[in-house]
Image (spheres, coloured by chain):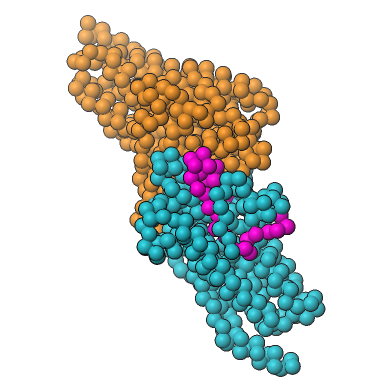
Chain colours: A orange, B cyan
Amino acid sequence: MKKNTMKNRMKDFARKNLTALSLKFEDGKLLLLDQTRLPHEEVWLESFTPEDTISHIQRLAVRGAPLIGVAAALCLAQYAQSGASSEQIKSAAMRLREARPTAVNLMKAIDRMLETSDVTDFSPSALLEKAIEIFDEDVELCEKIATRAAKLIEDGDTILTHCNTGGLATAGVGTALGAIRKAHESRKKIHVYVDETRPLFQGSRLTAWELQKLGIPYTLICDHMAALLMSQGKIQKVFVGADRIARNGDSANKIGTFSIAIAAKYHHIPFYVVAPNTTVDETCLTGKDIPIEERGAEEVRLERSPKDCQVFNPAFDVTPAELITEIIRA
Amino acid sequence: MKKNTMKNRMKDFARKNLTALSLKFEDGKLLLLDQTRLPHEEVWLESFTPEDTISHIQRLAVRGAPLIGVAAALCLAQYAQSGASSEQIKSAAMRLREARPTAVNLMKAIDRMLETSDVTDFSPSALLEKAIEIFDEDVELCEKIATRAAKLIEDGDTILTHCNTGGLATAGVGTALGAIRKAHESRKKIHVYVDETRPLFQGSRLTAWELQKLGIPYTLICDHMAALLMSQGKIQKVFVGADRIARNGDSANKIGTFSIAIAAKYHHIPFYVVAPNTTVDETCLTGKDIPIEERGAEEVRLERSPKDCQVFNPAFDVTPAELITEIIRA
C-alpha cells in the first residue's frame, strides 16, 4: 500500500507539469518568476522550501491574490513530496497562510490543502492532487470571468485599470486584465490607461509589460491622474481586481482603488471588479472585517524624502459596494 | 536726469536685499535655491540671464505659482540693470511669460513689469521698484491668507496637504502650508499628512523638508492613500494651494488635487484652497479656460516601465468650485 502510494505519487509528479506566465511546476519543482525584476529582467526563482516561498510572497516577487494561493498550495505539495512529516506540513501551512494578511485566496488555498487529510496524516499525492486542482480551477475561473467581463467592453472603449490583474497575478489569463485581453483578442479596438500603482509600480512594471507583450495599446499615468482623464471624457470604464470581497460586496484591492471608485462615481463611469470566487470571504460581513496589510516605510520613501521620516504605507484599501457597478465573479 | 536715474538705480540695488526661503536678491544678483536637489542638498543657483531663469523655471528648480512670478520679475529687473535694451527686455519678458503655461502669477507679474513703461523705453529703476513691490506684496499676501486660513485649523486637527505650498513656493510664509505653519506657531496641536505628489515628489522632497525644519509632526503617504485615511476618520481638513483660479472659483492646482477634492466631498471633509489674489485669473470664466501643462514622459517612467512606453503627464488638474468649501484669498 505504502509502496503503491509512492509509485502513484512519482507518476503524478512526472505526469503533471504546470505552466503559467509567472509560475512553473516541473517534475515536482516549483519555479516562480521574480516580479520585482520586471519589466527589464525575467529571472526565475527556485522555491525549495516553504521559507523560500514565504519570502518570495512577502517581498512581492510572487504577487497577485489568486497566484499566491496557487503558489502556496504547490509549495506545500512539493514540501510533502520532499518527505516532510505531517507535523512539518501543518506548521509550514500555518506560516504560509500568514505570509500576507489581506488576499484571502492564500488562506483559502491553504485551508483546502489541509482539508485533504485528517489532522494526523497527510498524503503527498492527495496534497499534489489538490494543488493541481487549485491551479486548474484558477485557470478555469479566470477564463470564465474574463470572458464574461470582456462582454462589458465595447469597441472603441478606453479603460482604466489599477495594479496588475493579468497573467502575472493568476495561474490563468488574469481577472480584470484578462477581460481586457479577451476584448482585444475579439478584435475590439480598445485603449488602456495604466495606473503606475505606487508605491511598488505594479502598473508601470507589470501591467505595462503584459500589455506590451500582448500588443494592446496603453498609456501609463500616475495614480492620481485618473480623475482628470475622467473629466475629459477619456475613460469609459474602470476594471480592477480584488484581494478580498466581503459578503456585502465591499472589495479590498490594491491601495488607490477606492480613490478611483469615488472618482468614477462622481463622473458616472462604470466601475467593475473582476475576481474569482476564491477571493470572496463569506466570514467578512463587510469591508470593515477585512484586515489591511501595512508595509515598510522604505517602499514609499525611495530616497526622496527626509531620512527616517514617518510613513503610512497601507497596501490595500476597501471600496464600498455602493461604488461598484458590478462584481464579475465565478 | 539720465545720470540721476542711474545713481538712484544703483542706490536702490545697494539698498534692497531680498531674502526668501528659496530666493535671494543680493546687490542686484538673483540667487535661486535648486529645489530639484532638496531635501538632501541645498544648492543655490545664480541666474545671470533670462535664459537661466527660464531654464530654472522649466525644470522646476524654481517652482510654486507665486514664487515663479516673483523670480521672473526680479530676473527682468536684473536684466535691465545689466544694460539690456528695451527691445531685449520686452523680448525676454515674453519668453519668461511663456516659461510655464498654467500658473497665472507668472503672466501677471510679467505684465505688471511691462506696464511700468510705455512700449518704447523701460526704466531699470522702475522695473526694480516694481519687482520689489511684487516680492513684498507676495510676502504680505501670504501673511494675510495664511493667518486667515490658520483660524480654520483647530487644536487636534489632522490635515492633508498636496504638493508644496510653503516658504519654498512663495516669497513669504506660503499659502496652504503657511496656514499650517501659523496654526502650529499658535500652539495648536496638529498633524499633517503629506501627499508625496507624483511624478516629481514635491511633497516628499519639499513639504516634508519644510515641516521637518519647522518641527511640525507629519506622515508621508502616496497620493492615492488619502481616501483610505478619510474613511478611517484620520483627516479632518484638506488645505491646498492653487496655480490659477477661474472667475467661477474652479481652481487649477498640482495634478492629483481634483482626486482629493472628490474624495473629501464623498467623506464630507472640508476642502480649502489658499491662494493670493495674484492666482486669480478674471479672464478665465471657468476652469475649462485654464491651460493645463503637459510635461515629459520620463518624469513618470522613472526607469520602471517598458522603455519608450506611452505616457500622459499633465502637471495640473482643475478642481470644480462645487468641491471647494472655501477659497481663502487676499
Residue at 23 percent across and 9 percent down: it is A3
The percent coordinates of residue B94 (x first, y second) are 73, 67
**At 41% from the left edge and 55% from the top edge, which residue is drawn?**
B154
Q: Is residue A69 visible?
A: no
> Where in the figure is residue B109, as x and y percent of width and height?
66, 69
Range drawn in magenta? B255-284
Q: Is residue A209 above or below residue A178?
A: below
- With respect to residue A55, does A179 lie above or below? above
State the image coordinates of residue A34 (x, y, percent, origin top left): 42, 36
Queried whether the magenta region covers residue A225, the answer comes back as no
Would residue B155 appear left or right of A90 to someone viewing this image? right
As rendered, which of A208 and B203 lies closer to the eye?
B203
Residue B201 or residue B318, whichever sits in front: B318
Quick check: A3 above or below A101?
A: above
Along the line of sight, the residue nearer the viewer: A38 or A257? A257
Q: Does the stretch in magenta take in B282? A: yes
Q: Quadrant of the N terminus of chain A?
A: top left
Rendered residue at 69%/69% (across/down)? B110
